[in-house]
Image (tube, rainbow, N blue to C red):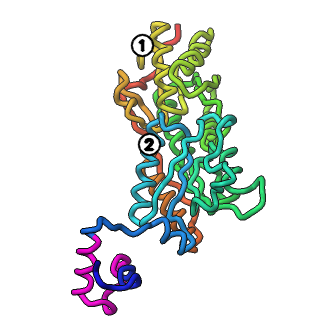
Amino acid sequence: MAGVSQSTVSLVHAGKWPGRVSERTVRAVNEASAALGYRPNQAARHLRLGTTRTVLLVVPALTNPFFGAVHTGASEAAARRDFSVVIYPSRIEAGTERAPFASPFAAAHTALDGVLASSTAVETLSELLGSTGPGPGLPLVMLDSEPGVGPATVNVDVAAGMRDLVGHLLDLGHRDFGRLTPHIDGWTFTARENAFRTALAGVPGTRSTRARTHFTVHDAAEAALTLLDRPDRPTALVCDDDVLAAGAYKAARQRGLRIPEDLSVTGFDDLIIATVMDPELTTVRLPAHRLGADGMSALLDLLDGRRPQDQSLPAELTVRGSTAPPPART
């Protein structure tokens, strides 16, 4: 229709025409393309170039808003460099998930250029990266993973956030602590637990008890009750996630305890529910959007042949109405 060769059309659509094709010809190609509704076949182009310009983001279930923000940050960073993101929400408690692209007709290394993954999806990653079979693994950057022992990592300094949180409670006078932690043995939760114990170790007269729970408000409430029903009930519950803290609120109401007059409660992440709960929740704010964006930028740098450095993003203690000095013991 434009009266030109295939190669001329290719130059125009690829933006490589200046100095090689006249502006008059460019207009003719663009007018013919518009009339025909023609668009370049990006899949064919990527096949010719040996790249898909598609990366996989593996995170726990998106029912947790934190990982929704991680996805948004990662997708925006990818789009700025002309990459697409496929998201795979692995189960937040690993063991039964089935890896994407598991079919022999759609091997991951032919469908993807790289993977950005949370450390809570180890079993899924082992299939994706080819560690259980022949062939090269995919380029990988990890989120919430131990730095210095494998692929490049982008983390949040959760240990510093936990130390600040415990310091805040100690300054208020708390010495009896309860911990609500998830049934997940990920690096990020181990780092929080170690920081919690270290913060208490140098303070005389402190003690703590722990209950583990699944990532639901109902299960967290049941776990919190086991702590609140102890004869030596803690004066502060330190929860590893705001969802778990919501369960602690529910348990406190069931036992007629006022927050913060009778019981202080803290969370982690600073999800939107932190400001919906009454009183608003004292928590540690983690930069989820930036975590996704910086993680994706590191992966794309790796694909460009540059070795990204491990990164640690700051966490911020956010004090609200759910913490106060402990009640006087009678």
Confirm or deny contact between disc 2 and disc 1 (CB under 8 A): no
Q: Nearer the viewer, residue 84 or 244?
A: 84
Outermost residue on the bottom side: it is 19
Measuring 53% from the left and 58% from the top, which residue is drawn there? 55
Q: Quadrant of residue 39?
A: bottom left
User: Mark 2: which amino acid?
Assistant: Gly
Q: Position of residue 267 (x, y in %)?
A: 48, 31
User: Mark 1: which amino acid?
Assistant: Arg
Q: Is residue 119 above or below residue 264?
A: below
Taking the image as shown, residue 235 lies to the left or right of residue 78, namely right
- The reply to whether residue 327 is visible in this rendering is no
Q: Position of residue 241 (x, y in %)?
A: 51, 32
Q: Nearer the viewer, residue 319 or 298?
A: 298
Image disc number at residue 290: none
Q: Is residue 272 above or below residue 154?
A: above
- The reply to whether residue 146 is visible in this rendering is yes
Magenta-tinted stretch: 12-33
The verdict on residue 24 being magenta is yes
Q: Position of residue 282 (x, y in %)?
A: 42, 31
Q: Quadrant of residue 198?
A: top right
Return the residue at label 1. 258
The verdict on residue 193 being magenta is no
Taking the image as shown, residue 275 lies to the left or right of residue 56, namely left
Return the residue at label 2. 68
